[in-house]
Amino acid sequence: MKVRSSVKKMRGRVFVICSKNKKHKQRQG
């Protein structure tokens, strides 16, 4: 999953991806 790598490097976009994938929100807490 390329999104996972991007999320770790860009935390600002993390919240954006969380909106698309609810599972990412749990991982970021």
Image (cartoon, rainbow, N blue to C red):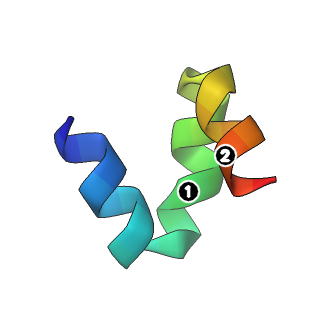
Question: Which element is circle 2 on?
Answer: helix
Residue 17, image x, y percentages:
52, 40
Seen in the picture, residue 11 relative to 15 is either above or below; the reply is below
Q: Mark 1 packing: few (<14 Cα in 10 Å), some, or many (20+)?
A: some
Q: Quadrant of the N terminus?
A: top left
Q: Amino acid at mark 1?
A: Val
Q: Nearer the viewer, residue 9 or 16?
A: 9
Seen in the picture, residue 1 relative to 22 is either above or below; the reply is below
Which residue is painted at 66% across and 46% down in the image? Answer: 27
Q: Is residue 2 left or right of residue 9?
A: left
Q: Earlier in the sequence, mark 1 or mark 2?
A: 1
Residue 5, image x, y percentages:
26, 58
Query: Between marks 1 and 2, how big is the CA–CA gap?
Result: 10 Å
Which residue is painted at 55% across and 56% down in the image? Answer: 14
Q: Nearer the viewer, mark 1 or mark 2?
A: 2
Q: Is residue 8 left or right of residue 23?
A: left
Q: Amino acid at mark 2?
A: Arg
Task: Tell me the quarter of the picture where residue 18 sits.
Answer: top right
Q: Nearer the viewer, residue 8 or 14?
A: 8
Q: Nearer the viewer, residue 16 or 27?
A: 27
Seen in the picture, residue 16 relative to 8 is either above or below; the reply is above
Which residue is under mark 2? 27
Task: Tell me the quarter of the picture where residue 2 sits.
Answer: top left
Q: Is residue 4 left or right of residue 24?
A: left
Which residue is under mark 1? 14
Q: State the residue lying farthest toward the right.
A: 29
Q: Mark 2 packing: few (<14 Cα in 10 Å), some, or many (20+)?
A: few
Question: Which element is circle 1 on?
Answer: helix
